């Protein structure tokens, strides 16, 4: 424990890498702000419809995930 304390003191005395100062956040300034929409527009928007293609696609994805889970359960470690 004593050695850890001494090493941490030595590390605190060292100088860090010479990095340029951060002037803005990385995500800041990369795009436009979202457009504001009135609340009534959001509340009156119809719900998206689930199509038969979407249902079939989702069922095939579920079947693939269940098959993958079964294969993973079968692996003995």
Image: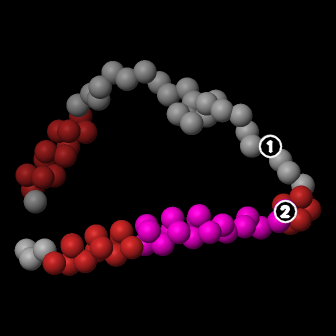
- Marks 1 and 2 sit apart, C-alpha to C-alpha, by 16 Å
* Position above or below: 33 against 51: above
Give the image quarter of residue 38: bottom right
> For mark 2, what is the residue?
45
Report the residue at 13% width, 74% height from top.
Answer: 75
Estimate the x, y position of residue 66 in percent, counting from the top left.
Answer: 34, 75
Q: Magenta segment, which residues?
A: 45-62
Q: Is residue 60 found inside the magenta-colored segment of the image?
A: yes
- Quarter of the image for the C terminus: give it: bottom left
Judge whether residue 15 can be spotted in this image: yes
- Left or right: 32 with respect to 72? right
Report the residue at 20% width, 43% height from top.
Answer: 9
Identify the element where label 2 is drawn.
loop
* Position above or below: 25 against 70: above
Q: Foreground residue, 35 or 28? A: 35
Give the image quarter of residue 14: top left
Q: Is residue 25 found inside the magenta-colored segment of the image?
A: no
Q: Foreground residue, 72 or 18? A: 72
Estimate the x, y position of residue 2 in percent, counting from the top left.
Answer: 9, 56
> For mark 1, what is the residue?
35
Report the residue at 43% width, 21% height from top.
Answer: 20
Judge whether residue 39 can be spotted in this image: no
Residue 60's tag is: none
Estimate the x, y position of residue 5 in percent, counting from the top left.
Answer: 16, 52
- Left or right: 33 with respect to 2? right
* Position above or below: 12 against 70: above
Q: Earlier in the sequence, mark 1 or mark 2?
A: 1
């Amino acid at each position: 424990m004593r050695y850890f304390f001494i090493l941490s003191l030595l590390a605190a005395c060292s100088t860090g890498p010479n990095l340029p100062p951060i002037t803005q956040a990385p995500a800041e300034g990369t795009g436009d702000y979202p457009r504001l929409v009135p609340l009534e527009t959001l509340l009156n928007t119809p719900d998206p419809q689930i199509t038969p293609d979407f249902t079939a696609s989702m069922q095939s994805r579920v079947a693939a995930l269940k098959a993958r889970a079964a294969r993973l359960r079968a692996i003995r470690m």
